[in-house]
Image: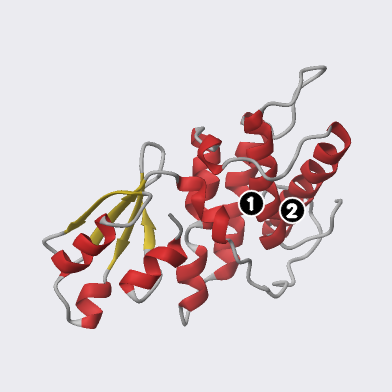
Amino acid sequence: MTPARLAEVLGEPPAPDGTWEREAVYVSAAALRRGVPAAGLAARLRELPGVTGAEALPSGFVRVVVAVPGALLDDFRPPALADPGWPDFPRTWENPGFVVRYGHARAAAVRRWARELGVPRDGRPELLSSPYDRAVLRVLAELPGRAASRDPGWEAWLVRLALAYHDAHERAPAVPMGDAAPEPVHAARVRLAAAVESVLIGPDRI
């Protein structure tokens, strides 16, 4: 279940909520904005494949739980973001330009390594179940809503995505270590890396 599919019912992209470490949750104020019963929208959402729960909250918001967080990659549309013009130096973690460009470089390197090792990049999204994979997906899930916003805050979002990906790159590797054979989870992580690379700004190498 993707944000775009949820938006077909809600009339607007939902926003991810929480950390997604245990469950992938979206919330939406669409019922309030449209002046329709939240319970009705929740009932329609519960009928969608891939939705494991949907409820109307006392606030009038609708809360939706999806079964596969990584399913958002099935309908992933990267925006064409302008380079914020961050300086190249210093190349330290205090420089947001370095953080973002290095994240892009790491994601691009994964694609090259995967090609050399024979790891496909069309892995199954349900295998992206580690906390580190899910943290990256949680940030990526904000993309449709930010793209529709008048004040998307892209610069801060790019830094958050890069930081989440750095953690995933180091703690949930997308390519096998040493002489180990590639596993299905590696293919899923290569697919995640491709999505990150398509969004983060920077050269292939740093």
Q: Which mark is residue 170?
A: none
Give the residue type that dot 1 points to.
Ala
Label 2 to label 1, Cα distance in Å? Answer: 8 Å
User: Tag 2, which secondary structure?
Assistant: helix
- Identify the residue at image location x=75%, y=56%: 101
Residue 95 spot, x, y in % from top left: 70, 56
Q: In the depicted view, which residue is nearer to us: 5 or 148? A: 5
- Residue 32 x/y as whole percent: 20, 76
Query: What is the quadrant of the N terminus in the image?
Result: bottom left
Q: Which residue is mark 2?
A: 104
Question: Which residue is painted at 76% across and 50% down in the image?
Answer: 102
* Image-based side of 12 in relation to 124, left or right: left
User: Which residue appears at 49% of the width and 35% of the height?
Assistant: 131
The relative height of residue 95 versus residue 31 in the rendered view (above or below) is above
Q: Residues within 10 Å of mark 1 (few under 14, many from 20)?
A: many
**Near-viewer residue (81 or 55):** 55
Q: Position of residue 28 (x, y in %)?
A: 30, 66
As helix, strand or loop, the secondary structure at mark 1 comes to helix
Q: Which residue is mark 1?
A: 162
Q: Is residue 39 above or below residue 100?
A: below
